[in-house]
Image (cartoon, coloured by chain):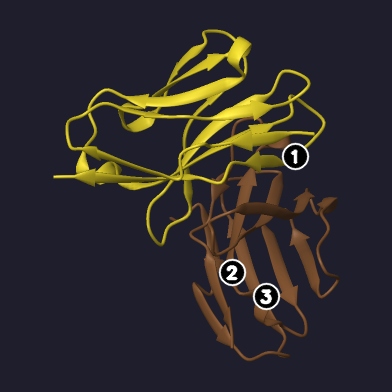
Chain colours: A brown, B yellow
Amino acid sequence: DTAVSQTPKYLVTQMGNDKSIKCEQNLGHDTMYWYKQDSKKFLKIMFSYNNKELIINETVPNRFSPKSPDKAHLNLHINSLELGDSAVYFCASSPYEGTNGYTFGSGTRLTVV
Amino acid sequence: AQSVTQPDIHITVSEGASLELRCNYSYGATPYLFWYVQSPGQGLQLLLKYFSGDTLVQGIKGFEAEFKRSQSSFNLRKPSVHWSDAAEYFCAVGAASGTYKYIFGTGTRLKVLA
């Protein structure tokens, strides 16, 4: 069983479209995250939820909206996609506060054309 | 503010040679420190972590890292590199408590020559 699974793995879409990425973890972790990895491999946190509560909301355009229906799921919806949104988006999870490290999903490569 | 620096963007070593990847951090209190590895097309996998105790920590895949507070460094080492170690390596720092996010370094790409 995959511990942290993301769908889809690849997403190619046109500018202006709206898309969603889904993430599920079966580790029983309390906290889930979305990270963005740009073309230079730089990883930056976007959001974090702890037991369905938003706890981190970095400086991210409000076109990005996370949703956590339960502590095992964290989805990312992106409105009005722009070229600059092209990146790899990683979901991750951790026990409380992440002090034991994250478990990452395999990523969603988003390409906006 | 927290920051992590990985001075080497690319490193090339021969298979069987030793490896050291550098990581320097800036943090006002005692940090949690991590090394992750990312193989092509994959997510990041935790290699090892440090918070307190013995400053030399052992991780998976034969890796180890040494915390040196005086140098604000947490360098990753492996005595003998295998071709399968070719990947991107990321150092990360997290606060000791009260926060849930890590700051990642920019990564070091390791190439292994046969």
Query: Mark 2, mark 1: which one is toward the viewer?
Result: 2
Relative vertical location of residue A68 with respect to residue B9 in this rendering, above or below: below
Q: Amino acid at mark 3?
A: Gly
- The numbered mark at residue B49 is none
Q: Residue at x 26, y 26 (%)?
A: B18
Which residue in the structure is indicated by mark 3? A84
| Quadrant where the C terminus of chain A is found in the figure | bottom right
The foreground one among B95 and A30 is: B95
Q: Residue at x 74, y 24 (%)?
A: B96
Residue B108: percent from the left, percent from the top? 45, 43
Relative vertical location of residue A105 with respect to residue B88 in this rendering, above or below: below
**The residue tagged with tag 2: helix, strand or loop?**
strand
Q: Amino acid at mark 1?
A: Tyr
Q: Chain of mark 3?
A: A
Q: Amino acid at mark 2?
A: Ala
Report the number of numbered marks. 3
Q: Residue at x 67, y 40 (%)?
A: B103
| Quadrant where the N terminus of chain A is found in the figure | bottom left
Residue A85: percent from the left, percent from the top? 67, 74
Which residue in the structure is indicated by mark 2? A87
Do marks 3 and 1 both belong to one polypeptide chain? no
